[in-house]
Image (cartoon, rainbow, N blue to C red):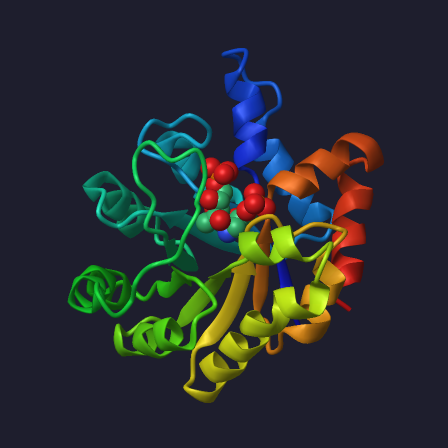
Amino acid sequence: MTRLSVNINKIATLRNSRGGNNPDLIQVALDCERFGAEGITVHPRPDERHIRYEDVYALKKVIQTEFNIEGNPLEEKFVELVLAVKPKQVTLVPDALEQITSNHGWDTIEHQDLLIRLIAPFKAAGIRTSIFVDPDIDMVEAAKSTGADRIELYTEPFAQSFPDQPTQAVAAYRKAAFRAHQIGLGVNAGHDLSLENLAFFHAHVQPLDEVSIGHALICDALYYGLENTIQLYKRQLK
Ligand SMILES: CC(=O)[C@@H](O)[C@H](O)COP(=O)(O)O
Ligand SMILES: NCC(=O)COP(=O)(O)O
């Protein structure tokens, strides 16, 4: 079974655009769960341009499904936040400060020692740790040596190539997920997954423990409504 974790960053972006509390991020998270989401993902960034650190504390108090916090563990504030909140899962993403959105995975070979050191406190706190990686067998194998529990495959390159060359687009992901499973790593995936590409990805990349989806899902909700949209996404994972 592949769990759908809804990334609510875009809800916070909308709320922040007017300075009030509309839409109410907490209510949206609860509604996502009520409508069938099996997890809630947030990716706070140091400038708090969407999810604020205080949102993360507030969400932890109410979320009943799996809470996944994504971010860069080189930010001390991020590590403090995760250790204080103790989500079910932390996903480590090597984002630079000025990045608009995530655009690459870790080099788990070059940063092996760093990752071992960064992951240790999360493991000690009993938080499942996932590392954001490109679909590269060497990166997957080295991720295992860091002590991570899972990898999250960065799917933007898949999403970009999918319309023209679907089979070619998914090939590296299929191999990466298979190898991860062989060596005892769980497999998550995310970034630009959508109603157009999700069923194909799910059919070809197995095992797949979780997908985290935000941008496309929230865009679709403008047309189909949040409840219908979450159900539509879940249907792609059957
Ligand atoms: C790691 C990943 O792919 C997502 O968390 C993505 O970075 C969402 O962040 P934004 O909503 O800031 O684009
Ligand atoms: N980890 C990926 C995520 O949370 C959502 O990415 P996107 O669907 O907003 O591109």
Q: Is residue 233 above or below residue 176?
A: above
Nearer to me, 138 or 37: 138
Nearer to me, 168 or 202: 168
The image quarter in which residue 172 lies: bottom right
The quadrant of the rendering that contains the N terminus is bottom right
Task: Locate residue 126, reporting x and y percent.
Answer: 32, 66
Which residue ends up furthest to the front in the rendered image?
164
Q: Is residue 99 above or below residue 128?
A: above
Q: Is residue 2 in sight in this rendering?
A: no
Q: Is residue 147 above or below residue 97?
A: below
Residue in view at x 83 percent, y 37 percent:
224
The quadrant of the rendering that contains the C terminus is bottom right
In-image side of 225 versus 132 (left or right): right
Residue in view at x 42 percent, y 84 percent:
184
The image quarter in which residue 28 lies: top right
Residue in view at x 54 percent, y 79 percent:
175
Residue in view at x 48 percent, y 68 percent:
135
Which residue ends up furthest to the bottom in the rendered image?
182
Q: Is residue 123 in sight in this rendering?
A: yes
Nearer to me, 200 or 128: 200
Task: Locate residue 152, reporting x and y percent.
Answer: 47, 63
Nearer to me, 172 or 75: 172
Task: Locate residue 47, reporting x and y percent.
Answer: 33, 27
Task: Locate residue 14, reporting x and y percent.
Answer: 58, 22
In-image side of 227 versus 24 (left or right): right
In-image side of 31 versus 131 (left or right): right
